[in-house]
């Protein structure tokens, strides 16, 4: 495995041990770690094999495996939701969308009982009442994208809007449909034009963030011969996102650890380069006390949530992450940003390779976060 030396010998050894132990214990076949403390970058460091199993989930011979490198591209999974949120908020800044107007005013196909009250703010905070998943890709395997989106938009609410937090990929793909309809532009083109191009202008390292990666540069995810996909590589793992063409609101972006770290540093130090000051503040701030009101204690998730960002989710952000923002992804990815501690942490893995049933990522993410927070604290005292 190719490993870059991190900047601090002590933390280098601790983090190397933590991640190597996870790889050797088969929590994940590969990982790439990078972080920044007070603007000083450490890593990326690569561990394990990006491709370790064949299309039928059988282990590959050592000579046929593809080692992870610092340039390996990973399926970011739900980390994509941060980019979806920034895209939608850019459209709010441009007057194309509104945070607190009913979605149905733009999307007449967003039908069903109680859905006339759902707003973009509800969708971005997972308080719309929509369920977590949409199974139209299974019920309509031969349908085109338009028919699939029509079916998704007809998904019934599981709860009245604004009464409970329910993490919803359906909601973020509704944001996709809302943005496409309002802007008259395909989602992939929209994200590229108003977010990714701006990021590339701010930091060239973000050029690796894309909906259209080179498959040969990618880590493999799940082996799904039953779906005719074999070892999925360079194509989005999430089945609903794949059915919608790969470029979706809930998942679909790919990137390297260094590219995602650069994005995280922009969020930490210069969100105003992406959004107006008022929206940058709302993006970062916990929305749930205001959106859920008296329902917060019973209907909240136990952590905060901004407009697309999780806040202080300690089970993976670490014991010191009460002020952290970020998101994790089902494939084994995560981005953590903490302005108070002046740090950003990126851990990219393909823990679903060859199967989603084999590992639990929260302990690894938390251990990495705790170690970086400890390094930041030592540095602050020096």
Image: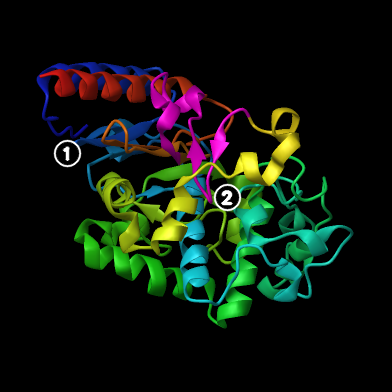
Q: Which residue is mark 1?
A: 41
The local secondary structure at tag 1 comes to strand
Magenta span contains residue 309:
yes
Front residue (pair 311, 262): 311
Q: Which residue is mark 2?
A: 238
Residue occupying the point 38% across, 62% down: 210
Do the CB atoms of the residues marked 1 and 2 lie less than 8 Å apart?
Answer: no
Front residue (pair 111, 2): 111
Q: Is residue 81 left or right of residue 172?
A: left
Q: Is residue 253 left or right of residue 344?
A: right
Residue occupying the point 69% across, 67% down: 101
Which residue appears farthest toward the bottom when viewing the image?
184
- State the CA–CA distance, disc 1 to disc 2: 31 Å
Q: How is the image coloured?
A: rainbow
Residue occupying the point 75% across, 35% down: 295
Counting other residues with Cα less than 10 Å from the Cα at mark 2, is it few (<14), some (14-19), or many (20 or more)? many
The stretch in magenta equals: 302-326
Q: How many numbered tags mark residues here?
A: 2
Q: Position of residue 19 (x, y in %)?
A: 31, 23
The N terminus: image quadrant? top left
Q: Locate residue 32: give its quadrant.
A: top left
The C terminus: image quadrant? top left
Q: Position of residue 158 (x, y in %)?
A: 82, 46
Q: Locate residue 31: give its quadrant.
A: top left
Which residue appears farthest toward the right when viewing the image?
113
Q: Position of residue 276 (x, y in %)?
A: 40, 64
Counting other residues with Cα less than 10 Å from the Cα at mark 1, is it few (<14), some (14-19), or many (20 or more)? some
């Amino acid at each position: 495995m190719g490993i870059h030396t991190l900047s601090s010998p002590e933390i280098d050894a601790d983090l190397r041990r933590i991640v190597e132990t996870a790889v050797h214990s088969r929590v994940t076949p590969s990982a790439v770690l990078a972080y920044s403390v007070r603007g000083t970058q450490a890593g990326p460091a690569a561990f394990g094999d990006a491709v370790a199993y064949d299309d039928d989930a059988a282990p590959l011979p050592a000579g046929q495996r593809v080692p992870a490198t610092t340039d390996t591209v990973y399926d970011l999974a739900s980390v994509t939701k941060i980019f979806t949120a920034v895209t939608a908020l850019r459209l709010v800044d441009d007057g194309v969308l509104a945070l607190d107007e009913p979605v149905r005013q733009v999307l007449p196909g967003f039908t069903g009982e109680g859905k006339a009250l759902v707003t973009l703010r509800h969708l971005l905070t997972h308080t719309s009442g929509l369920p977590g998943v949409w199974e139209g890709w299974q019920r309509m395997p031969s349908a085109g994208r338009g028919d699939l989106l029509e079916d998704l938009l007809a998904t019934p609410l599981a709860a009245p809007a604004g009464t409970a937090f329910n993490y919803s990929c359906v909601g973020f793909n509704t944001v996709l449909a809302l943005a496409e309809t309002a802007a008259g532009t395909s989602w992939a083109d929209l994200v590229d034009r108003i977010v990714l191009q701006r990021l590339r202008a701010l930091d060239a390292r973000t050029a690796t963030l894309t909906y259209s990666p080179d498959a040969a540069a990618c880590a493999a995810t799940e082996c799904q011969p039953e779906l005719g996909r074999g070892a999925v590589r360079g194509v989005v793992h999430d089945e609903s996102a794949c059915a919608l063409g790969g470029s979706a609101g809930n998942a679909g972006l790919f990137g390297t650890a260094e590219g995602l770290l650069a994005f995280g540093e922009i969020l930490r130090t210069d969100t105003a380069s992406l959004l107006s000051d008022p929206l940058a503040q709302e993006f970062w701030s916990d929305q749930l006390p205001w959106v859920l009101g008296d329902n917060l204690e019973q209907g909240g998730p136990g952590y905060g949530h901004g407009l697309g960002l999780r806040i202080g989710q300690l089970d993976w952000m670490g014991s010191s992450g009460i002020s952290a923002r970020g998101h994790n992804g089902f494939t084994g990815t995560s981005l953590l940003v903490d302005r108070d501690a002046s740090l950003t942490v990126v851990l990219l893995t393909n823990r679903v390779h060859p199967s989603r049933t084999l590992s639990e990522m929260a302990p690894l993410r938390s251990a990495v976060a705790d170690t970086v927070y400890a390094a930041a604290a030592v540095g602050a005292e020096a």
